[in-house]
Amino acid sequence: MEEVISKKRIFSGIQPTNTPTLGNYLGALINWVKLQDDYECTYSIVDLHSITVRQDPAKLKKQILESYSLLLAMGVDPEKSTAFVQSHNCQHAELAWILSCYTQFGELSRMTQFKDKSAKHPENINAGLFTYPVLMAADILLYQADLVPVGQDQKQHLELSRDIAVRFNNIYGDVFKVPDPYIPKTAAKIASLQDPTKKMSKSDENPNASISVLDDRDTIIRKFKRAVTDSDTVVKYAEGKDGINNLMSIYSAVTGKTYEEIEKEFDGKGYGDFKLAVGEATADRLAPIQAEYARLAADKKYIEECMKLGAEKAFKTTRKTLQKVYKKVGFIVI
């Protein structure tokens, strides 16, 4: 009898605030699709996290539906993976409360993101903003995740999740898996088109700085034509050519071509030709996603069925973990 080797579990979430950028897609979401074949994947639209900043309720509801539909349009399979909306599984909030009692005030006060968001929103430094990392820890630990894909800005939060898991396990025994970061071998790092020293961001005030995955073809090409480069004219990946390096990273990610192949392709051609080619290739890459998104967005009943399926799978997976935690801390489980 052959030994059955279970797949490792991965958990990752994305906030439903604004449409994902090309940077989100090439840097993270494209890998979510690839990971489904080799791992047991749980993907969440983390809407509970989004309300640490004031949201318009009607707009938030629309963005949750859009974000979920986009995940499916990009290739996340609701049958193969668990794809759900965070607020549809109440156990996230329940575990977050318990874990907050095992998290030190000093640990939370050192979180860089709390400091940054407090500075941006001084009129609304709420308790949820402060305890946000505990909810993130609950998201991960509920699913007994082995691995968590993280960017540079989330490493500190994952470290806290690991510390909380270790602390709880030291008191009550082996309750939580201590998650490791998952760093993909090939992850495109996409910078702003207007300031290539910064990452491409949904919240950038300059509309020409980022590409939305739902931008139309003309808009995509126009934004790339306006991309910041340098005074040189040679398409070559080199130090000090941040703008061109960024465009080459994007072109490589959407076409599969190496930097060497790109340099040969544009040998003797100027930046204008290159920017146009990057814009057209990006639009070509996003077109099938946009078409599938339009189809799914028109089928609200199907999206709601997928959400319900995802919520049921998520609840079933996490129930065992939460009941174990309840018993360990002394609650009566009925």
Image (cartoon, grey):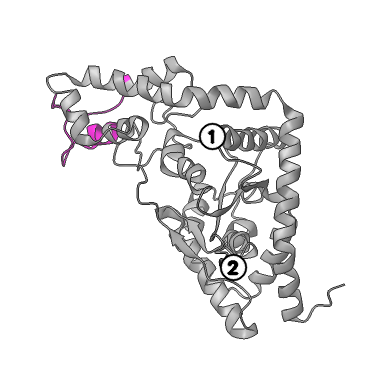
Residue 73, quarter of the rendered image: top right
Q: Identify the residue shown where x is 42% and y is 52%.
A: 151
Please name the amino acid that badge 2 sits on: Met
Give the CA separation, mark 1 to mark 2.
38 Å
Specify the farthest residue to the top: 218
Residue 138, quarter of the rendered image: bottom right
Q: Quadrant of the C terminus?
A: bottom right
Q: Identify the residue shown where x is 59% and y is 27%.
A: 293
Q: Identify the residue shown where x is 48% and y is 36%.
A: 202
Please name the amino acid that badge 1 sits on: Met
- Magenta residues (range): 225-247
Task: Provide residue 32's location: percent of width, then percent of height.
Answer: 50, 45
Task: Provide residue 241's location: percent of width, then percent of height.
Answer: 19, 36
The overriding secondary structure of the stretch rendered in magenta is loop
Considering only order in the chain, which callout, 2 or 1, is on the residue closer to the N terminus? 2
Residue 1: assigned label: 2
Task: Identify the residue position indicated by label 1 in the image.
Answer: 74
Question: For this view, does 73 lie left or right of residue 283?
Answer: right
- Confirm whether the magenta stretch covers residue 230: yes
Q: Identify the residue shown where x is 58% and y is 39%.
A: 17
Front residue of this view, candidates 237 and 201: 237
Q: Secondary structure at mark 2?
A: loop
